[in-house]
């Protein structure tokens, strides 16, 4: 998730799986016959029309990484904290449990000796450092657009992961899609009241289609003191998350 945002964060965070702190990242790379030099990074988070531009990392050997937006693109001096999972007995006993920031996974497992390196994706998993302290987190979850299978399962896993894995206690559910932010429709979410929601259809938070007032949503997030927003939506629903 995805996941609680650890060292890498997508625009929506969407990261939804808490064991993974990164959405997929496409990496293009040509065959490398020599040792790659230090990578050069070009970061242009926002374009002229307010849309996110890709961050590109390259090297002299033909390595190209199209990266995802990260919190530190906007807040360079953001402090980091040790991941609470290091003290969790269910995870701390696993050797090398945390994922290295440079780890990637190849899209194609079977290749030929003369094949290009092809596309890769950033490896999902928890990082050693996170950008939040658990007792300061006030998270919210919203489901938007059309219904699809698994919405309640995602809500349940986010709540249980935040609570059991990271020690977060303040989690809100925004009812009725994006417009629920400024309609003040919320419910408190705990592991207890989401325990069996994965057995139900639809979404316990309800959803809606259509436009939304971005400025009202941002004002509501600020007024409530929310500092983590988890948005679950169909790919083509509700326009661009970059508006937030």
Image (cartoon, rainbow, N blue to C red):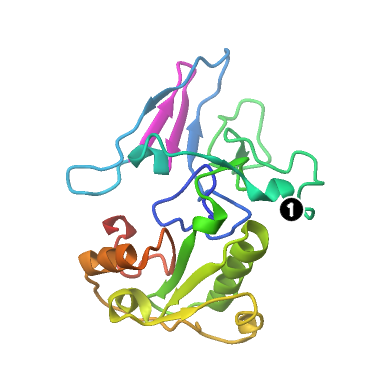
Q: Main structural element of the magenta stretch: helix, strand or loop?
A: strand
Horizontally, residue 221 falls left or right of residue 96, namely: left
Give percent across and percent down for residue 112.
Answer: 66, 31
Residue at left offset 47%, top offset 64%: 139
In magenta, the rendered stretch is 54-68
Q: Quadrant of residue 228?
A: bottom left
Label 1, residues with CA under 10 Å away: few <14, some 14-19, many ≥20: few
Query: Closest to the observer: 16 or 88?
Result: 88
Query: Closest to the observer: 195 or 81?
Result: 81
Query: Closest to the observer: 102 or 186?
Result: 186
Q: Residue furthest right?
A: 93
Residue 104 in the image: above or below residue 155 = above
Residue 227 among those drawn in magenta: no
SS category of the residue bearing label 1: loop
Residue 61 among those drawn in magenta: yes
Residue at left offset 43%, top offset 24%: 58
| Residue 160 visible | yes
Give percent across and percent down for residue 126.
Answer: 63, 47
**Quadrant of the snapshot with the N terminus:** bottom right
Q: Which residue matches tag 1?
A: 88
């Amino acid at each position: 998730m995805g996941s609680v945002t650890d060292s890498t964060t997508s625009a929506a965070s969407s990261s939804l799986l808490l064991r993974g702190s990164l959405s997929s990242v496409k990496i293009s790379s040509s065959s490398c016959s020599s040792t790659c030099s230090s990578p050069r990074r070009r970061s242009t988070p926002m374009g002229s029309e307010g849309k996110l531009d890709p961050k590109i990392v390259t090297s002299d050997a033909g390595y190209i990484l199209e990266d995802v937006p990260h919190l530190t693109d906007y807040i360079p001096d953001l402090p980091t904290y040790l991941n609470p999972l290091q003290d969790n007995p269910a995870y701390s006993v696993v050797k090398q449990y945390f994922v290295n920031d440079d780890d990637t996974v190849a899209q194609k497992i079977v290749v030929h000796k003369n094949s290009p390196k092809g596309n890769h994706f950033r490896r999902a998993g928890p990082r050693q450092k996170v950008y939040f302290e658990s007792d300061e987190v006030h998270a919210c979850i919203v489901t938007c657009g059309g219904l699809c299978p698994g919405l309640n399962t995602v809500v349940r896993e986010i709540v249980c992961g935040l609570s059991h894995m990271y020690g977060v206690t303040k989690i809100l559910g925004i009812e009725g899609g994006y417009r629920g932010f400024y309609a003040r429709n919320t419910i408190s979410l705990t592991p207890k009241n989401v325990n069996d929601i994965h057995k139900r259809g639809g979404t316990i938070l309800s959803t809606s289609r259509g436009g939304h007032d971005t400025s009202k949503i941002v004002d509501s997030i600020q007024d409530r003191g929310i500092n983590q927003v988890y948005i679950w939506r169909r790919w083509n629903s509700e326009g661009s998350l970059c508006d937030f």
